[in-house]
Image (spheres, rainbow, N blue to C red):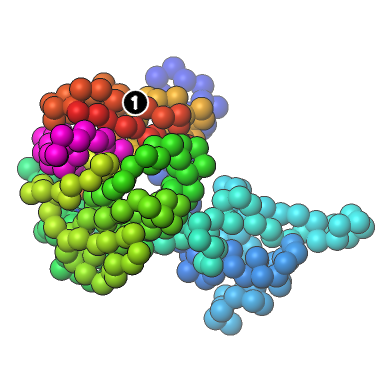
Amino acid sequence: MDLSNGESVSELIQAQADVLNHAMSFIKSMSLKCALELGIPDIIQSHGKPMTLSELAAALPLHPARGDHSVHRLMRVLVHTGIFALQKVDETGHDQEEGYVLTHASRLLLKDTSLSCRPFILGILDPDLTKPWHFMSTWFQNDDPAPFKTAHGRALYDYAGHEPRINLILNEAMASDSQLAIKAVISKCKGVFEGLQSLADVGGGTGTMAAAIAQEFPTLECIVFDLPHVVAHSQDRDNLKFLGGDMFEAVPPADAILLKWILHNWNDAECVKILKRCKEAITRNGKIGKVIIMDIIMGHDTGDKRSVETQLLCDMAMMVVVQGQERNEKEWAKIFSEAGFSHYKIYPKLGFRSLLEVYP
Ligand SMILES: C[S@@+](CC[C@H](N)C(=O)[O-])C[C@H]1O[C@@H](n2cnc3c(N)ncnc32)[C@H](O)[C@@H]1O
């Protein structure tokens, strides 16, 4: 069969490169995972200056059968994708030898930094979380809520309740995301927490976000509310308390409810249910509070193409791993209104996510 549709050979060859590039993009993810598992960012960091290939290979826990050449090939793709960079070893420029250095991206991959994305990356690339992607086309032809269920027989949070390893991976992944998220929120929109006496972080995981808010606002009573197996080992301290429960049943009363990366996990009907429980919790004893949401707004100006692509990938992840979705402003407004809220405010963008305040 002649595939050509009038294109020139050069166009077809370029198209082939594009298709192969698309198909092999998972190799970027797996090379990154390998670098994290081998501890490469930390090894380069502790070297303190550009690290040559032979120095890096000597510092890695390599089998004698793996020579410098394999390390060079791994590092070459990670330099190409911007995870690492190359710099002249000799600052005077006399010696042309180059060594690996960290970039902004790989500084976020170090183990011992409070802002590390390492647990998040190792979490999403865990075999249990990548398996559902092989079941996407099967899911398109069955009535399971998400490919995760097709792959594992249970929905994600149910599965995590039965698999302590996955529960730990998910909690650590979310906690690592929260470290950077709260830094951004406090530096760009601290005012959202001012004047509050109480705050419940619903689906707050193991409390990283709430702990940082509690520390920043010592007179604010913070409650972390999550499934019982998630908060089981967390200890109350000062103005931070932990409570296990089901947000579809009830959420703890407070002046404000925080929902960070929660609603994108659920379909519209489930979001409306959660938001109704939140409305009950913030309207009591004649008080009217607010719901603070940190999530993606699709189509909201993020300022760069890479963030838009990150949003699109997050949306697919929500479809495959849970039965959720990322929403545009119109879709957000619809669920707010259906849950009985009258208006909302969007704070200036926080990278690929936004902060919204929703009022009854
Ligand atoms: C994507 S994580 C977000 C965690 C945290 N808000 C953050 O951003 O770091 C979703 C959280 O919702 C919790 N969750 C799921 N179903 C829940 C339910 N029915 N009631 C309360 N929490 C629930 C999960 O255990 C998980 O901690």
Q: How far across and down, in percent of the image, does residue 214 sit?
A: 38, 55
Is residue 266 magenta-colored? yes
Looking at the rendering, the stretch of residues picked out in magenta corresponds to: 264-292
* Front-lying residue, 179 or 222: 222
Count of marks, rendered view = 1
What amino acid does circle 1 point to? Lys
In the current view of this chain or complex, which residue is farthest to the front? Answer: 285
Judge from the rendering whether residue 227 lies leftward or rightward of residue 209; answer left or right. Answer: left
Q: Vertical placement of 242 versus 289: above or below? A: below
* Front-lying residue, 285 or 100: 285
Q: Vertical placement of 62 versus 279: above or below? A: below
Judge from the rendering whether residue 299 lies leftward or rightward of residue 268; answer left or right. Answer: right
In the current view of this chain or complex, which residue is farthest to the top? Answer: 6
In the current view of this chain or complex, which residue is farthest to the bottom? Answer: 64
Q: How far across and down, in percent of the image, does residue 53 sit?
A: 70, 67
Q: Which residue is mark 1?
A: 345
Give the quarter of the image for residue 226: bottom left
Is residue 316 magenta-colored? no
Q: For the point 26% across and 49% down, which residue is it?
A: 200
- The verdict on label 1 being within 8 Å of ligand 1 is no
The quadrant of the rendering that contains the C terminus is: top left
Q: How far across and down, in percent of the image, does residue 101 sit?
A: 68, 58
Q: How far across and down, in percent of the image, does residue 114 sit?
A: 50, 61
Q: Is residue 135 visible?
A: no
